[in-house]
Image (cartoon, helix red, strand yellow):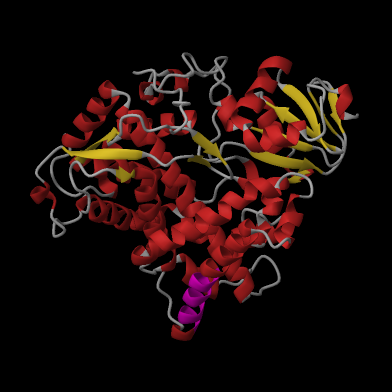
């Protein structure tokens, strides 16, 4: 069925929808769902694109009929940076690579990572100065990057975190321009953007290949992900291990995915807390009830409200804000037949804010995630909340992200409350993930005497804030 036969807007001029998707997707796509319903279509060049906004449709594409789809255009283009890693590979290669990486994310092993997550949070929190303005998005990115480097690769990259983070940011910003038709051709032109991207990729490759070379030369098993991937052989497949290129692709994927999404979730959490004094006070009360000692994995069960804050943050500001798939054959949905190679979009940003499933959907209400809250309503469709995707492509590091996010929020909150700099514009920037366009400038206020949290401390055991400030900077 041609896109003209599906509900959706008609193009008024060439390139109209391509520009809308690149420049204002968080306005354009929700308007489509609002105006045309759960199945809404538009075309870019000759490419039919269909937005699905009902949780049952999300379930069918990602789970029930997942084998009838491949990744969408965005992650196809991401191969220019990630290669054939877990995010971008398909079919048997994806299953093989996931089998080899899965043991590193076993529940027991993730628990062992928890102490590192908390320790790195304490270290970064100890470097803040009361009243000194900082960019929380940069701080959270440096923190999560250091955690991923240490836990998954047993590499201390904290000193390089800022430089590596800048290289990742440069690469990510390029993606938006490559997802439109013929966008990949831009990378072959001598443009400033292209040169910046290539320098960033070379910087990241140098870091990762250095880690691989050092580990191959040492030949030891340090019990981390890199050791597992170096030593693993696919016993369910051809019995071989990974080449250096395959190792590079998986390491690059996990370096990006393992820090980017959690950093964004934490950044948005601090913003929402700063706008919600009652929620912030409740979080602080829960953290304070655990005492002054360093937090650890044993404390997770005693942090239900902290977890609820993270869950509600990812509802309003999902780090992965959209999922794309390409139909391999004709696909029927909502009484319509989509032609082969149709691009299907499913947006967490839209579904997570749908008032059909979420009472007072635009408000920041972590209590909805506590026992008896609206999130536990059995009538709510399961896939009205899917921050980590679903099906065979569900995020391999989901439990890693939950643990890191909860421990980080609680550990930073032991010492600090964060206040948004007056007049700072808060504008979501939807690229591969949901970033903040102008960073998140905040001022830390000390809650307690920092001497009670020295580095030698042993490791132990509702407000209307959902709408971002659309102001533009002067």
Q: Is 266 in front, or is 308?
A: 266
Residue found at x 58% / y 45%? 432
Image label count: 0
Q: Is residue 242 visible?
A: no
Q: Quadrant of residue 338?
A: top right
> Residue 360: percent from the left, percent from the top?
46, 14
Q: Residue at x 49, y 50 (%)?
A: 397
Residue farthest bottom in this picture:
217
Is residue 206 highlighted in magenta? yes
- Tell me which secondary structure the magenta stretch mostly adopts: helix
Left/right of residue 335 with respect to residue 59 in the rendered view: right
Residue 428 location, x and y as percent? 50, 34
Residue 109 painted magenta: no
Q: Quadrant of residue 63?
A: top right
The reply, left or right, for residue 117 in relation to residue 60 is left
**Compared with residue 137, is residue 100 higher up or lower down, i.e. above or below?**
below
Residues in magenta, as a range: 205-216
Q: Is residue 258 above or below residue 435?
A: below
Give the quadrant of residue 69: top right
Quadrant in which the C terminus is drawn: top left
**Residue nearest the viewer, comparing 59 with 167:** 167
Q: Nearer the viewer, residue 30 or 318?
A: 30
Image spot of residue 461 (x, y percent) = 22, 49
Residue drawn 66% across the image and 73% down it: 239
In this rendering, the answer to whether 115 lies above or below 332 is below
Residue depicted at 41% across the width and 57% down the height: 145
24 vs 152, left or right, is right
Q: Taking 464 as reference, is 190 left or right?
A: right
Taking 356 as reference, is 281 above or below it? below
Q: Is residue 273 visible?
A: yes
State which quarter of the image contains the N terminus: top right
Residue 315 place in picture, x, y as percent: 48, 29
């Amino acid at each position: 069925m041609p896109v003209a036969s599906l509900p959706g807007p008609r193009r008024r001029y060439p390139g109209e929808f391509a520009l809308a998707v690149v420049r204002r997707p968080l306005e354009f796509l929700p308007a489509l769902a609002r105006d045309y319903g759960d199945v809404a279509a538009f075309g870019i060049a000759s490419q039919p694109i269909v937005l699905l906004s009902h949780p049952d449709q999300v379930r069918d594409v990602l789970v029930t009929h997942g084998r009838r789809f491949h990744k969408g255009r965005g992650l196809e283009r991401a191969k220019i940076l990630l290669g054939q890693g877990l995010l971008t590979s398909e079919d048997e290669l994806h299953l093989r690579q996931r089998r080899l990486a899965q043991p590193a994310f076993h529940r027991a092993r993730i628990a062992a990572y928890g102490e590192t997550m908390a320790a790195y949070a304490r270290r970064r929190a100890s470097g803040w100065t009361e009243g000194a303005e900082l960019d929380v998005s940069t701080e959270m990115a440096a923190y999560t990057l250091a955690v991923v480097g240490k836990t998954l690769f047993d590499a201390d990259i904290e000193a390089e975190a800022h430089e590596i983070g800048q290289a990742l940011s440069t690469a990510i910003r390029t993606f938006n321009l490559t997802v439109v038709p013929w966008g990949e051709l831009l990378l072959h032109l001598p443009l400033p953007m292209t040169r910046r991207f290539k320098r960033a990729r070379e910087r990241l490759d140098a870091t990762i290949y250095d880690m691989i070379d050092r580990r191959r030369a040492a030949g030891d098993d340090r019990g981390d992900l890199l050791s597992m991937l170096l030593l693993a052989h696919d016993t369910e497949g051809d019995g071989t291990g990974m080449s250096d290129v395959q190792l590079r692709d998986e390491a690059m994927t996990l370096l990006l995915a393992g820090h980017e999404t959690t950093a964004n979730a934490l950044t948005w959490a601090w913003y929402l807390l700063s706008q919600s004094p009652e929620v912030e006070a409740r979080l602080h009360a829960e953290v304070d009830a655990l005492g002054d000692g360093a937090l650890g994995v044993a404390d997770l069960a005693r942090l239900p409200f902290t977890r609820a804050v993270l869950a509600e943050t990812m509802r309003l500001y999902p780090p992965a804000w959209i999922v794309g798939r390409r139909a391999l054959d004709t696909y029927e949905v909502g009484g319509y037949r989509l032609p082969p190679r149709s691009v299907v979009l499913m947006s967490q940003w839209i579904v997570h804010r749908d008032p059909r499933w979420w009472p007072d959907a635009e408000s920041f209400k972590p209590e909805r995630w506590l026992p008896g809250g609206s999130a536990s309503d059995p009538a709510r469709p399961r896939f009205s909340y899917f921050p980590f995707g679903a099906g065979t492509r569900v995020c391999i590091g989901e439990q890693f992200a939950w643990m890191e996010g909860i421990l980080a929020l609680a550990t930073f909150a032991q010492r600090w409350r964060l206040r948004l700099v007056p007049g700072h514009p808060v504008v979501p920037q939807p690229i591969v993930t949901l970033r903040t366009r102008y960073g998140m400038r905040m001022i830390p206020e000390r809650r307690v005497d920092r001497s009670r949290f020295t580095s030698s401390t042993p490791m132990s055991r509702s407000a209307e804030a959902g709408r971002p400030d659309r102001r533009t900077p002067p």
